[in-house]
Image (spheres, helix red, strand yellow):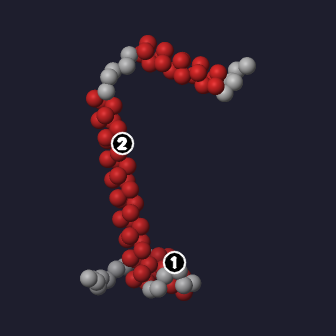
Amino acid sequence: MTVKSSISLTDSQAAFARGLVENGRAASLSAVVQQGLELLREKRNAEAAETEALRAVLEARARGPFVGEEDFRRHTDQMLTEASRKYALGD
């Protein structure tokens, strides 16, 4: 289904859109607006997916075991020591 709408563009937006049509990058001004809206929809969907993924990670982390400062430092030091040995760092 197609819906006809009247929109207002700034002079620079109109010039840019016309340039896209004139250079064959878009079939019409309507196509330019449609592509712009699709890009905006994709961006919003990607942001929503990223937010949901972050929320899931944070919730999973909140349900996980608590690691005290000493255990955290010991584990971090161990990882750094192993990485240094593996990559022959600090020799």
The amino acid at mark 2 is: Leu
Image location (x, y in percent) of residue 66: 33, 21
Other residues around mark 1 within 10 Å, as few (<14) / some (14–19) / many (≥20): some
Which residue is nearer to you in this view: 79 or 86? 86
Residue 4 horizontal side relative to residue 50, left or right = left
| Quadrant of image for the C terminus | top right
- Name the residue that disc number 1 marks: 16
Residue 18 in sight: no
Residue beneath disc 2:
54
Indicate the secondary structure of the residue bearing disc 2: helix
> Looking at the image, is 24 positioned above or below residue 91?
below
Pointer 2: residues within 10 angstroms few (<14), some, or many (20+)?
few
Q: Which residue is at a point 33% across and 31% down the rendered structure image? A: 61
**Comparing labels 1 and 2, the label whose residue is closer to the camera:** 2
In this view, the residue in front, 68 or 64, is 64
The quadrant where residue 37 appears: bottom left
The quarter of the rendered structure image containing the N terminus is: bottom left
Residue 34, image quadrant: bottom left
Q: Earlier in the sequence, mark 1 or mark 2?
A: 1
Which amino acid type is marked by label 1? Answer: Phe
Residue at x 44%, y 86% (from the top left corner): 28
Question: Which residue is depicted at the point 35% across and 52% down?
Answer: 49
x, y percentage for residue 58? 33, 36
Q: Residue furthest top?
A: 70
**x and y percent of residue 59 in the render?**
29, 35
Quadrant location of residue 84?
top right
Q: Nearer the viewer, residue 11 or 65?
A: 65
Above/below status of 73 relative to 15: above
Res. 38 in view: yes
Please state the horizontal and vertical placement of residue 85, each as a whole percent of the image: 64, 21
Distance from label 1 to label 2 (Cα)?
36 Å
In the rendered view, would you say 63 is above or below 53? above
